Image: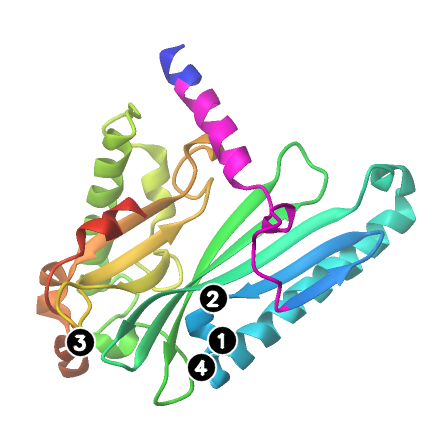
Amino acid sequence: MKQFARWAAALVVLATASLPCSLSAGDPKPDFQIVSKSIEASVLLGAPIKADAALATDCLAEGRKWAEKYRAEADAARKEMPDAFRDGGWTVERKYDQRSLVAERYVSIVRSDYTNTGGAHPNSDLDTIVWDRSAGKRISIRPFFKDLADDGAALRAIRDAIIVSLKTEKLKRDIDEPADPEWTKAIAPKLLKIGAVTLAPSTEPGKSSGLTFHYPPYAVGPYAEGSYVAFVSWDKLKPYLSVEGAAIFGGTRPKGDEDL
């Protein structure tokens, strides 16, 4: 009962925190918006992203496509079930926020989605982007490692470190778990299954202190637990880094970054 009470309280906090930014008068104006009887959809770019023309163009194009997809779905749903829209339409929002800039070249972005389509509760999702300013395109973290093959030594080591980090965070939240919880199975030592990754900022200018992996609600625990960020320090990555990777990692994780 004690655990249930904690989850229930967390659910209230999460639902409140997930309210769309369009409800707050002081929030910035969307960079793209759709307002109709079926839906209010918005896309917002953080200021550092807007300052980079190529990056802003890339993110906005993706965001517009995402919003238009939801508009088509909302229009179809309203046509089929008009009563469901009597009190208003869907609300969806996508935000792009810069997390770090490493070596004046690699930009890490957290992409946050909020969707309220009339279900039991609003939903939120997280994904990440690593942008190479020199190449003018999105990249994976593969170039920073000698070998990042699925089920290889590097990804197995990263997976183990992620699970340790998440278990530590769950203890901080007073979440009691079995020794081998079911959620660990969702984190596979595969580049596309291990989690949405960013380069963590560092106390050493121009460097990254390691990798952070971002998990939305439901990914590694019940919805009421909210989202999680796992940190893997660069010293744990050191044996597996390529020359390019060794050049960008150093320092330690800033204290304030632990509050993500």
Q: Amino acid at mark 3?
A: Ile
User: In the rendered image, is residue 102 in sight?
Assistant: yes
Q: Position of residue 182 (x, y in %)?
A: 36, 34
Density class for disc 3 (Cα within 10 Å; few <14, some 14-19, many ≥20) is many
Nearest-to-viewer mark from 3 and 4:
4
Q: Position of residue 56 (x, y in %)?
A: 51, 77
Disc 2 + disc 1, Cβ < 8 Å: yes
Query: Which of marks 4 and 3 precedes in the sequence?
Result: 4
Disc 3 + disc 2, Cβ < 8 Å: no
Disc assigned to residue 248: 3
Disc 4 + disc 1, Cβ < 8 Å: yes
* Left or right: 62 in relation to 67: left
Q: Amino acid at mark 1?
A: Lys
Q: Is residue 7 magenta?
A: yes
Query: In the rendered image, which residue does mark 2 sit on?
Result: 46
Q: Amino acid at mark 4?
A: Asp
Query: In the rendered image, which residue does mark 1 sit on?
Result: 50
